Image: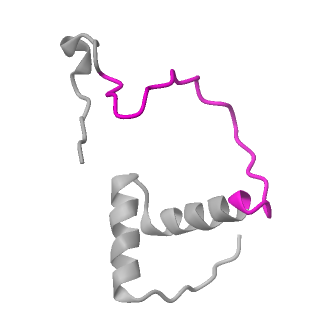
């Protein structure tokens, strides 16, 4: 693995730290994830996954995926709203 020093202005570094915290990643891991996924999005890199995650049921736009769920089963889940 190669290390590449990257210079960021204060606002970019703050935003990267915030995103890393929200996604439970180290700042360096978050930066690597962003770079790899942007390269893949542009068709320059193929990201190999270990296994496909379990299929997720489609939720209509604006609907909460927890609607109709037994409230007792939500224990320990965080519900984030904008």
Task: Assign the magenta stretch its main secondary structure.
Answer: loop
Quadrant in the picture for residue 33: bottom right
Q: Is residue 80 left or right of residue 2?
A: left
Name the spot of residue 38 as percent of width and height, x first: 64, 64
The answer to whether residue 46 is above or below residue 74 is below
The answer to whether residue 66 is above or below residue 8 is above
Give the magenta-colored segment's residue range: 40-66
Name the spot of residue 44 as percent of width and height, x first: 80, 64
Q: Which image quadrant: the N terminus?
A: bottom right
Give the number of marks. 0
Q: Which residue is at 30% across, 22% downward?
A: 66
Q: Which residue is at 33% across, 65% downward?
A: 18
Name the spot of residue 65 as percent of width and height, x first: 36, 25
Name the spot of residue 28 as percent of width and height, x first: 49, 69
Is residue 52 inside the magenta stretch? Answer: yes
Quadrant in the picture for residue 68: top left
Residue lying at the far front in this picture: please name it.
61
Q: Which residue is at 52% across, 69% downward?
A: 31
Of 63 and 39, nearer the camera is 63
Q: Is residue 33 left or right of residue 2?
A: left
Is residue 49 inside the magenta stretch? Answer: yes
């Amino acid at each position: 693995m190669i290390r590449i020093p990257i210079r960021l202005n204060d606002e970019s570094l703050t935003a990267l730290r915030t995103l890393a915290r929200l996604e439970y990643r180290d700042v360096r891991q978050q930066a690597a994830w962003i770079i790899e996924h942007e390269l893949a999005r542009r068709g320059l890199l193929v990201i190999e996954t270990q296994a496909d995650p379990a299929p997720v049921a489609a939720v209509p736009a604006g609907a909460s995926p927890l609607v109709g769920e037994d409230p007792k089963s939500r224990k320990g889940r965080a519900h984030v709203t904008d």
